[in-house]
Image: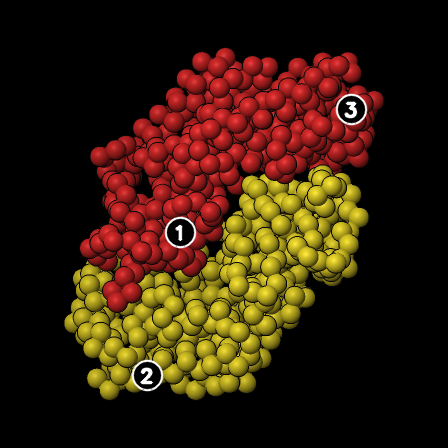
Chain colours: A red, B yellow
Amino acid sequence: VAPEPLTLSGLRTPALLLDRQRLVRNVDRLSRRLRELGTPLRPHLKTAKCLEVVRLMAGGWPAPVTVSTLREAEAAAGWGARDILYAVGLAPAKTPDVMALRSQGVDLSVVTDDLEAARAIGSAAAGQGLPVLIEVDADGHRSGIAPEEPERLLAVARALAEAGCEMRGIMTHAGESYGAAGPAELRACAERERSAALEAARVLRSAGFACPVVSVGSTPTSLFAESLQGVTEVRNGVYAFFDLEMAGLGVCAVDDIALSVLATVIGRQSAKGWILVDAGWMALSCDRGRGGRPVDNGYGLVCDPDGAPYPDLIVLRANQEHGVLALRPGSAAELPPLQVGDRVRILPNHACATAAQHSRYHVTQPGRDAVTDVWERFGGW
Amino acid sequence: VAPEPLTLSGLRTPALLLDRQRLVRNVDRLSRRLRELGTPLRPHLKTAKCLEVVRLMAGGWPAPVTVSTLREAEAAAGWGARDILYAVGLAPAKTPDVMALRSQGVDLSVVTDDLEAARAIGSAAAGQGLPVLIEVDADGHRSGIAPEEPERLLAVARALAEAGCEMRGIMTHAGESYGAAGPAELRACAERERSAALEAARVLRSAGFACPVVSVGSTPTSLFAESLQGVTEVRNGVYAFFDLEMAGLGVCAVDDIALSVLATVIGRQSAKGWILVDAGWMALSCDRGRGGRPVDNGYGLVCDPDGAPYPDLIVLRANQEHGVLALRPGSAAELPPLQVGDRVRILPNHACATAAQHSRYHVTQPGRDAVTDVWERFGGW
């Protein structure tokens, strides 16, 4: 007997839903913009960790991809990818695993921003031409060498060259753009990211390093960049799903968010205005968003089963397997008359974190009860 | 050729470590205390989600266990458990899956606090004597019926009886104890949990419901209770691992924490006093702790590879696969001279959340490089 087809109403909750129509729209939006700007995309696997999604993002498969872990690199290689950028500073002890993937014909390139690391990686790669990008710090967010420190940049480049690595280029990530306020600041972040990348490439090229790759990427900057001249690729992940963080930043609308968690009402505390559901932080993640935004979404924004948000209804508190729904403090809205057994969809603060709590996507279409596809995702390192 | 034995120094990072000596000590501490108080433990599977750990907690196997999801119930049944309490309010649509486990000979009991839910569950269970506990609200934390609302309690009990369910008893969880300050408040929380449970049982018994089970449990209250008279079982999970939340609450010492994340230094931002490691929120969880504690541990407290904390070194910021180590703001301590490639252990804010980011425990012994065991854990619903 064939198994019964999966339906939304038949899914055991909590379950992760992916709205295919929104996903495709989000993917098309960035593709169109990057075509206008003339810069190719190297989609980032870290958000979706799923072949079907990355294939949509890339517009075909195999395609160049970005990864944040060796496990992602190994998965992508297993799916046939032959051009992979591992965009997190390499721990030197991981070099043999990188070389093992390269020996299978995968052009896996790695990243560092540290002189000692460059020497250790170079030594472990034993002169076999491992391609390395130097990480550039565009905005003080995290890692990378600021272009204002050309000696540090050049010292790392020389160490790599001396060790027989290939100086593939530079990469940067404008992480501070997640804290920008409004389109003007987002455009400024994008231009700062581009100019930091180009300045670092200029320093390296002036010293004789070819630096063919100039890689930038953050979802806010890629969507708000007015020019990507001189940039050879952009890396993006979360734009395919979007989330309340991106909506709060003005990068997308709430109804662009393709990812949600389906939950069931399990009880009420009427005197407190609370509705209890079977999705807690285990299903939603502990990510409460960045804070400091004008609108607090708690652990997520609550929608009806078709995905339309209830006014001001948020996940106020989350325990491991309990979510407490309530109106935003101070709201004049009315608590919807949800009954035990009713279902809701919860939009996530941070799609990367929420998706990571699940092992598969249930792919949906607006207005249909059918789960049209189940796409597996993976975790681990 | 036999595979090389796993070692700490050979593990790919980030990796989840479990110190067996601390685990056993923590497990023994609660067992001893509960023996003194004369109340049996029904260990909670939700923290460890691992057979080897729950077997240690129970002091043998099979044993009665507590679960927070159907998936945990199915896993426990698969390991041979025959007495399982599913301690999260049941969504009525899950009743057939509950009955399917019961039909395999598992005494699986469920929980509700809602009249409609009781009717719907009773109807779905079709008079087959499904054992149900009524959830009691001891402290306004989350779900449950307060003992001060005897009519609500009795209405649910009557609906269950009319539907042919077995009124197995009551359960409560003193969740507010996680916000207690000091031993006196913890003892008061424990007594409030016990008295709320006993009062609810008294109400039900006065109305003719036998109410054989009086189940309480939270790690702080179980360890600080001075009496459990009248309580028939306690449910605990996180006490086996402990975490910075429990240490901040005074329930354990930092060196009781059995769980940690092994990470590798991948870079430094010397001017800022930052050390970058390859463990971000994906490996640590987004749980920043409850807040309001005198000591802020960021995303975790950083230790040397043997597990001794560096003074005031915390995970200040976390991106998906990057952790930024820095001294606590205002600290007079010195940044340890960590170099790229060096390893650290990071103690978690919340063991349940951190463990959930991983698929296995690497079991360690103090002072040894060997990983003595690898214990699998599961996720999902």
Q: Which residue is mark 3?
A: A154
Q: Is residue B161 visible?
A: no
What chain is tagged by disc 1?
A: A
Query: Mark 1 or 3 closer to N-term?
Result: 3
Quarter containing the N terminus of chain B = top right
Question: Of residues A47 and B126, which is closer to you in this image?
Answer: A47
Residue B268: tell me if it is visible: yes
Q: Amino acid at mark 3?
A: Leu
Q: Chain of mark 3?
A: A
Residue A177 point in image, percent of width and height: 52, 34
Q: What amino acid type is highlighted by mark number 1?
A: Gly
- CB atoms of marks 1 and 3 within 8 Å: no
Tell which subunit mark 2 falls on: B
Question: Label 2's element?
Answer: helix
In this rendering, position of residue A195 left or right of residue A91: left
Residue A253 rendering spot, x and y as whole percentages: 35, 34
Q: Which mark is residue A298?
A: 1
Q: Tag 3's secondary structure?
A: helix
Mark whose residue sits in front, 2 or 3 = 3
* Position of residue A157 measured from the top left corner of the image (x, y, whole percent): 77, 23
Question: Is label 1 or label 2 in front?
Answer: 1
Question: Which residue is drawn at the image coordinates 70% and 31% (left, top)?
Answer: A145
